[in-house]
Image (tube, rainbow, N blue to C red):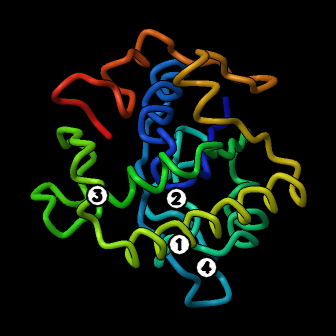
C-alpha cells in the first residue's frame, strides 16, 4: 500500500476513518498535517513531515488554511495510491455539529470531545450557524468537483457510521475500531459530536 489521502468535509467522521484505515493497513496516521508551500523552483507543495508511501493523511476541505481543490487534486493526491473523499448527506446535522463545536461557550473548542446537549443548539447565534452552513456547502462543492474532475472515490458518513458500509472499491476498514461510542449524536451523556 503506497498510502491513502482522505479529503473530507468538516464533521464527517474523518478522524475516525483516518484511524481505522491506519490500523487496517498499518500506516502512520497524519491528522491535518501542516502544509508546506513551494518557495523555490526545486521545492514543491507538500504536506510537512508526511511520507505519503507510509501514511494515511487526512485534510479538511474548505478550511481557511486549506489548499484549493485543484492543489489537492493535481499536486498532493498523485503522491498517494488511494484518495478518498468523505462527505455527509445530512447537512442539517453536520451544520449543528460544527456550530456546536465552534461555539464560543464550548470550553473544549476545536476539540471534538464534548458532551452532546441538544438544548444548546437553540442558543447558538443564527447568523453564525448560517455562515457555517455556507462553508459546509462550499466544501461539498469542492468534494463533488474532486470526484468528477479527478475521479477520486467518494464515500458517505452515513454509509459508514449508520449502515456500516464502506463503499470503496479497493479499501477496507478496521470495523472493530469504528464502534458506536465514536459516532456523533448518540444519546449517551458523554460522546463525541
Residue at the location (15% across, 59% down)?
A: 106
The CA distance from mark 3 to mark 4 is 48 Å
The CA distance from mark 4 to mark 1 is 19 Å
Query: Label 1: how many residues lie within 10 Å, few (<14), some (14-19) or many (20+)?
Result: some
Q: Position of residue 192 (x, y in %)?
A: 28, 36
Query: Label 2: how many residues lie within 10 Å, few (<14), some (14-19) or many (20+)?
Result: many
Badge number at residue 43: 4
Q: Circle 4 — which element?
A: loop
User: Quick one: quadrant of the C terminus?
Assistant: top left
The CA distance from mark 2 to mark 3 is 27 Å
Residue 175 position (above or below residue 116): above
Q: Is residue 140 left or right of residue 177?
A: right
Q: Earlier in the sequence, mark 2 or mark 3?
A: 2
Q: Residue 149 is drawn in which quadrant?
A: bottom right
Q: Are marks 2 and 1 in contact (CB under 8 Å)?
A: yes
In this figure, which residue is indicated by the disc labeled 3? 122
In this figure, which residue is indicated by the disc labeled 2? 60
Q: Nearer the viewer, residue 96 or 102?
A: 96
Q: Position of residue 125 (x, y in %)?
A: 30, 73
In this figure, which residue is indicated by the disc labeled 1? 66
Q: Is residue 8 left or right of residue 84?
A: left
Residue 167 position (above or below residue 100): above
Amino acid at each position: 500500500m503506497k498510502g491513502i489521502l482522505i479529503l473530507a468535509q468538516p464533521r464527517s467522521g474523518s478522524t475516525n476513518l483516518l484511524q481505522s484505515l491506519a490500523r487496517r493497513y498499518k500506516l502512520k496516521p497524519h491528522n491535518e498535517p501542516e502544509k508546506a508551500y513551494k518557495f523555490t523552483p526545486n521545492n514543491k507543495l507538500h504536506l510537512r513531515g508526511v511520507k505519503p508511501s507510509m501514511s494515511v493523511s487526512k485534510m479538511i476541505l474548505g478550511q481557511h488554511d486549506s489548499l484549493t481543490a485543484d492543489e489537492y487534486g493535481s499536486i498532493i493526491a498523485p503522491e498517494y495510491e488511494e484518495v478518498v473523499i468523505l462527505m455527509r448527506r445530512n447537512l442539517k446535522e453536520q451544520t449543528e455539529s460544527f456550530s456546536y463545536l465552534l461555539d464560543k461557550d464550548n470550553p473544549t473548542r476545536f476539540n471534538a470531545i464534548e458532551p452532546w446537549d441538544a438544548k444548546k443548539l437553540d442558543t447558538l447565534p443564527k447568523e453564525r450557524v448560517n455562515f457555517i452552513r455556507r462553508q459546509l456547502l462550499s466544501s461539498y462543492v469542492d468534494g463533488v468537483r474532486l470526484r468528477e474532475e479527478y475521479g477520486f472515490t467518494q464515500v458517505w458518513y452515513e454509509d459508514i457510521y449508520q449502515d456500516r458500509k464502506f463503499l470503496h472499491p479497493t479499501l477496507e476498514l478496521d470495523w472493530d475500531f469504528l464502534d458506536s461510542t465514536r459516532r456523533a449524536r448518540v444519546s449517551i451523556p458523554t460522546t463525541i459530536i
